[in-house]
Amino acid sequence: MFVAKVSKGDISGTTLTDVADTSYRVDSVFLKVIVRGKNVSLYSYKDDIKTRYYVLNNRDNELKELGYYAFESPKNQSVVIVRSYRRQLLATAYSFIDNDQKVIRAINNADYDEVTLLKIAQAINQSSGEQVTYETQTGARLFLGAAIRNNKLTFKDFPTPFKPGTSTTGYAPAVSFGIDYIANKRTKKLVLRAEVMLAANRYNFSNVSLDDRGSTASLDVKQFNVSLMPQLIYNFYTGDNLMAYFGAGVGFNYSTYNNYTFYGNYPNFAVSTDVKNKYPEFEKVSFTAPFKLGVVVNNTIEIGATYFYPSVLVTTDRTLAKATAFQLGVNYLFGK
C-alpha cells in the first residue's frame, strides 16, 4: 500500500471539459507492481475513471503519478491529449543515464500504456529483468524534540502534610529523543516509537492553609525525571505534506529530587513549628501512560499535545499523592 496522489480527471470523450482536469486526491491505495529496478520502479492503479501509472525514483524515494490528461478543444471540437508523462520520464532518465539518444527518442514517442512504459523503465534501470531489486517496506528514523509541560501534583488522602485535594501546578521544560520503527514507510500508518524524555518538574506549596486556626505549611520539591516510553502511533489522516495522528503508550519513570524540607506553622498549638527534611518521601520509580494527538508537516516537523495519566509519587499502604502533566511539544524527524 502506498500514499499516492490520484488524479481525478476523466480521459474519455463523453465527460471532457474545455480545460485539462489536473485535480487529484491523496489516498492510501494498493498499486500493481509492473517492475522494480535499481533506479526506478513502475506501478499502476486502475479504478472506474482510468488507469494511472506511477514511477518511484529510488534516489529520492519519491512516488509520482505520470500525468496523462485530456480536454475538448472548443475551437475545433477535437480531443486534445496532454502527455505530461513524457517530460516527467525525461527528467527521471537524465538523473540516471547519460545522454542516450535512443532512450530519449523512445520517451519522446512513448504511448501511455504498460508495455511501452515498462520498456522505458527497464532502459532507465539499464536492465531487462523485471525484478531487479526488492525494496524493504519497513523503515526507521530518529527524532529529537523539545516541549513545555504543565505539571500538577495533588495530595489525595491522610496521612499527608496537606489537606486532601490540595494541589499545585507549574510549568517546566522537557527534551526528548528516540527512534521510530515504521511498519510501512510508504503509508506510515503505524509507527512503533521508543522515546526517552528528560524533564524538570517543580511542585511548590507556599503557606498553604491547613485548618481554620491559622496553621499553614510549605513545601518546595524539585524533581528531575527520566522516562522511557514505548508507544504505538496511528496516522489517521494523510494529505499533501500533512499527516495527523494519535498514539498511546506506557511510561517508566525514574526520578531524583532536591534536598527539600517541609515547614509546618501551627501558631495556636503547643508545638508551633514542624520542620522535616525529605518529608513526605517521594517515589523514585513511577509509571504513567502518555496519550498523544498531533500532526506531521512535510515528513519533518511533528507538533503534538500529550496528556500523561496520573502517576503515584507518594504512597504508604494507599495512594497519597498523584502527579499529572499536559505537554505541548515539537519534534524534528530525521529522514523520510
Image: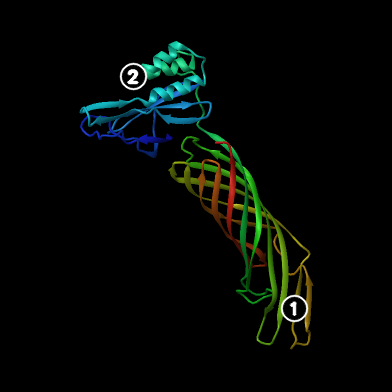
Check contact, mark 1 vs mark 2: CB within 8 A.
no
Among the 4 quarters of the image, the one containing residue 260: bottom right
- Residue 1, x across and y down, in percent: 42, 34
Q: Pointer 2: residues within 10 angstroms few (<14), some, or many (20+)? A: some
Q: Is residue 171 above or below residue 109?
A: below
Looking at the rendering, in which quadrant would you find the C terminus?
top right
- Amino acid tagged 1: Gly
- Residue 10, x across and y down, in percent: 28, 33
Depth check: give the residue in front, 307 or 25: 25
Q: Pointer 1: residues within 10 angstroms few (<14), some, or many (20+)? A: many
Among the 4 quarters of the image, the one containing residue 162: bottom right
Label 2 sits on a secondary structure element that is: loop
Any part of residue 221 in sight: yes
Who's the residue at 42% across and 17% down the image? 120
Give the left or right position of residue 29, taking residue 208 as reference.
Answer: left
Q: Which mark is residue 264?
A: 1
Give the left or right position of residue 113, taking residue 308 as reference.
Answer: left
Circle 2 residue: 111
- Residue 75, x across and y down, in percent: 22, 30
Q: CA distance from mark 1 to mark 2?
A: 87 Å
- Residue 30, x across and y down, in percent: 39, 33
- Amino acid tagged 2: Asp
Q: Is residue 155 above or below residue 238?
A: below
Give the left or right position of residue 239, taking residue 136 as reference.
Answer: left
Who's the residue at 36% across and 16% down the image? 109
Disc 1 or 2, which lies upstream in sequence?
Answer: 2
Who's the residue at 51% across and 44% down the image? 297
Among the 4 quarters of the image, the one containing residue 253: bottom right
Any part of residue 280 in sight: no
Label 1 sits on a secondary structure element that is: strand
Q: Which of pointers 1 and 2 indicates the residue nearer the eye?
A: 2
